[in-house]
Amino acid sequence: MAGGTTKDGRRAGVFEAKRRLRTEGAATFILLMLRSCKTDCCELSQLGKRRARRRGGRPDSSLAKVTSADCNPLTVERLGRFIIAHRISDDTFVSMKDTDELASQDGDTSRSPAWLLCVPQLPAKPDYLRVKLQRRVRRIGAAALKNSVYILPNLPETTEDLEWLRRELVADGGDALIWAASCVAGSTDTALQRLFRDLSDDEFRTIEMEARQLGERVSAVSNSADSRSDITRLRRRFHDAVKVDWFGSLARNAAEVALQALKRRDADVMDRPKTLSRISESALAGQTWVTRQGVFVDRIASAWLIQRFIDSRAIFKFVSAAAYGPRNGELRFDMYDGEFTHTNGGCTFESLLDHFGLSSPALVAIAQIVHDIDCKDEKFGRLEASGVEAILAGLVRSTSDDMKRIEAGARVFDGLYLQFGGRENDRVNL
């Protein structure tokens, strides 16, 4: 009876140690295995000596502590078979925040872990959270490993990205586990770097191919706002790919060359001053532009567009929609039954672009952002929309004066226009 109890105890110890191996690494596994079974053995001292030789003579303190005479061959034999079956070498370590104590005991804290591992945990519903997660990890440049584990190089910016990702998951009812890992079992640093290079290579080759295809139909671009928007989108995609090209993709240079060639061939589209001068000749100068009080996204953006590209001497008037009556010489925008308002499912900003023939890629990009915020239909899926909305919301809270809101908002849209490839001197001259 006593023998059976001892056997059951050993089995329980082996089972617990196996579980610990999966979560805490090989060195911790060996130590806890022996402590759990209350055994230790001389074989481990040999393992420690081999590791010491590989590390230039530095002893392994975690194994050196296991030194007593009571040896259990059965436990050691099972332990050895399990390590071999799972291909766990005596040089395999996983450094996690939960095992900092063991790392400090070992004395090797000078080298930071090379990788960050993230295991997201999503609620069963809603389903769109999985799509949102995929978009997010792709944007921060994470690579997917097996069983929904994502990996990134351990850098300050990637650490911040994963921390923000976890906050978003928690806000959506999920969570994420994040580790810093110095070595990954079953792979090598070289193999993981190759994984990231392959992902970057694929992205840059796709960008190169699309740039060449756009170049072939560049003659049609000058008459197509959609094609000009594609060029801007492709340039933005390239810049995003560069940000997450962690290990220097060899395909990056070819993609950049293709984009530069496309830019040269499309110079007549990207260079807008002549077109703006032509528009300014028929623009209405010094008009009174009327809109509703309490301006926000669409009205702030439309006022910026009017003042910069349509009527540089525009006078803005803010009224109560219920009490206002139309007057001669006044142009209404973003008002019911106004001259410029929502049409065909688009916002007022889009209506102004269409009416005055403004179709530069930078303005098209801004129109898509304004549409996604104002119409709330995510038609264009612009990632910048939430950030722009938050900035404008802060401006609105800072003052109730509509003109001050427009002046402050103009600086935001000036910056966006330059960011999307516009030029500082692109403006109406009246």
Image (cartoon, grey):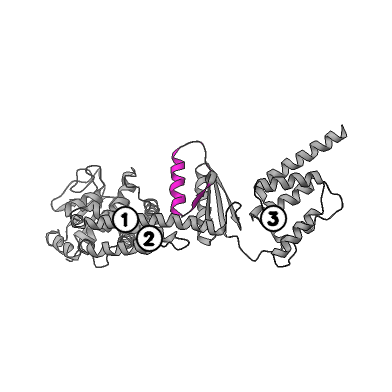
Q: Quadrant of the C terminus?
A: bottom left
Q: Residue furthest top?
A: 1
The amino acid on which the numbered mark 3 sits, given as a three-letter code, is Asp
Q: Is residue 219 left or right of residue 390?
A: left
Q: Which mark is residue 73?
A: none
Measured Cα–Cα span from mark 1 to mark 3: 46 Å
Q: Which residues are magenta?
A: 120-145
Give the image location of residue 327, x and y in percent. 15, 49
Q: Could you tell which of marks 3 and 2 lies nearer the N-terminus?
A: 3
> Which is closer to the viewer, label 1 or label 2?
1
Q: Assign a secondary structure to mark 3.
A: loop
Residue labelled with disc 2 = 239
Please say whether residue 137 is one of the residues in the magenta stretch.
yes
Residue labelled with disc 1 = 209
Residue 273 in view (yes/no): yes
Mark 2 is surrounded, within 10 Å at the Cα level, by few (under 14), some (14 to 19) or many (20 or more) other residues, namely few
Q: Which mark is residue 90?
A: 3
Residue 159 in view (yes/no): no
Q: Assign a secondary structure to mark 1.
A: helix
Please say whether residue 163 is one of the residues in the magenta stretch.
no
Q: Residue at x 34, y 44 (%)?
A: 378
Give the image location of residue 282, x and y in percent. 12, 59
The answer to whether 8 is drawn above or below residue 132 in the figure is above
- For this rendering, which residue is in front, 34 or 88? 88
Mark 3 is surrounded, within 10 Å at the Cα level, by few (under 14), some (14 to 19) or many (20 or more) other residues, namely some
Mark 1 is surrounded, within 10 Å at the Cα level, by few (under 14), some (14 to 19) or many (20 or more) other residues, namely some
Q: Residue at x 57, y 53 (%)?
A: 187
Measured Cα–Cα span from mark 1 to mark 2: 16 Å
Give the image location of residue 351, x and y in percent. 21, 49
